[in-house]
Image (cartoon, rainbow, N blue to C red):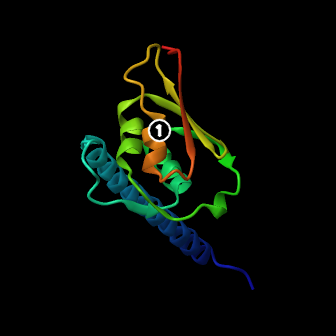
Amino acid sequence: MGVSLALVFHLASALFACGLGWWGLRLQRDIRFMRQMVVWAQADLSVKPASRVACTAPALIRRMARVAGVLVAGKLAEEKGFPVVGVDPRPLAQIFLRYPVSLVQFSHSTVTILIQSEKDVGRPDAGQLKASVAGSVSFEVSFSGSTT
């Protein structure tokens, strides 16, 4: 007994259709999240946030970096042990959308954000970033010279 060519073709087609559907749904979710990031980035930081996002800080930072196309390196120590907190996403969204972020480095309990710029263009406040994630991680913001 052999396997017919039609069966192999239909199975391959079904797998391809499932993969294409998964990719399309993920892309749609990322586009929706990017639109929400734009809304957050346009908000005034001096006003108390109307709502917070309930999640772990590393998960939100990783998702924002992935959607913004920023390279993420490293891993926070005991990343699974981070509590779910109310995160104010506005400062984080502003970092990823207003500055040329080239790398997000996780190490122990610190998140280092590397901004690719020759001059200090309105340095983001690391204390404000730490307050936005309820102090669950520390932030460092560093600048490096432009390669262009």
Which quadrant of the structure image shows residue 87? bottom left
Which quadrant of the structure image shows residue 71? top right
Q: Residue at x 50, y 15 (%)?
A: 146
Residue 40 drawn at (x, y percent): 30, 48
Find numbered disc 1 in the image and state the secondary structure of the residue it sits on. Answer: helix
Q: Residue at x 49, y 27 (%)?
A: 115
Residue 59 drawn at (x, y percent): 53, 56
Residue 61 drawn at (x, y percent): 50, 49
The relative height of residue 23 versus residue 70 in the rendered view (above or below) is below
Residue 95 vs residue 67, the one in the foreground: 95
* Tag count: 1
Residue 124 vs residue 18, the one in the foreground: 124
Amino acid type of disc 1? Gly
In the image, taking residue 46 as reference, residue 92 lies left or right, namely right
The relative height of residue 51 versus residue 143 in the rendered view (above or below) is below
Farthest-out residue, bottom: 1
Q: Which residue is mark 1?
A: 127
The relative height of residue 13 versus residue 23 in the rendered view (above or below) is below
**The N terminus lies in which quarter of the figure?**
bottom right
